[in-house]
Amino acid sequence: MRGFTDYRMAKRALVREVSEGQRPVSDVCDAHPELLRAARNVGTAVDQDCPICELADDRAEVARDDVALRQVIYVFGDSLRRRSGAVVWNRAELGDLAATHTSFTAYVVECCLVCGWNHLIESFLLGTEHRR
């Protein structure tokens, strides 16, 4: 993938700020209702715990239940026209878009259905112009 950006370091730094009390939880658990709805209905389940719910559970010394962390993919680009800004249901659909449109950017966002944590995980360029 061309133009790939991984935001894991930024995520770790943000979680560290919250854990050290430098940033309030309300700053990071502010998912927009549309993002929460997309995560609930078409998001892909992530095999990890939410870092903020995990932090709260560790502090409270309470056993964690299964936390609903999901990833949602959004696509933006002029060649997508009306589909720009839309949610992509799965990676196969992303491949179909890449084969039929010249250039667009995909953004993968992580969202917790429990606390509202959300963070950009990665972004990358796709489309016929960006094939290797």
Image (cartoon, helix red, strand yellow):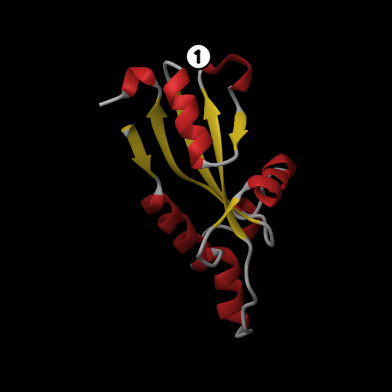
Query: In the image shown, does 24 or 100 lie closer to the viewer?
Result: 100
- Residue located at (49% from left, 26% from top): 97
Instruction: Check the image and report above or below for 27 versus 1.
Output: below
Please say whether residue 21 is visible from this viewpoint. Answer: no
Quadrant of the drawing holding the N terminus: top left
Where does residue 117 sit, x and y in percent of width and height? 61, 55
Where does residue 67 sit, x and y in percent of width and height? 62, 68
- Which residue has dot 1 on it? 79
On screen, residue 94 versus residue 33, left or right, reads: left
Instruction: Check the image and report above or below for 104 versus 95.
Output: above
Query: In the image shown, does 118 or 94 lie closer to the viewer?
Result: 94
Q: Quadrant of residue 129?
A: top left
Instruction: Check the image and report above or below for 79 versus 55.
Output: above
Query: In the image shown, does 55 or 108 lie closer to the viewer?
Result: 108
- Residue located at (53% from left, 48% from top): 119
The amino acid pointed to by label 1 is Ser
SS at mark 1 in the image: helix
Where does residue 48 sit, x and y in percent of width and height? 50, 65
- Residue located at (74% from left, 44% from top): 33
On screen, residue 61 versus residue 122, left or right, reads: right
- Residue located at (57% from left, 64% from top): 52
Where does residue 44 sit, x and y in percent of width and height? 57, 51
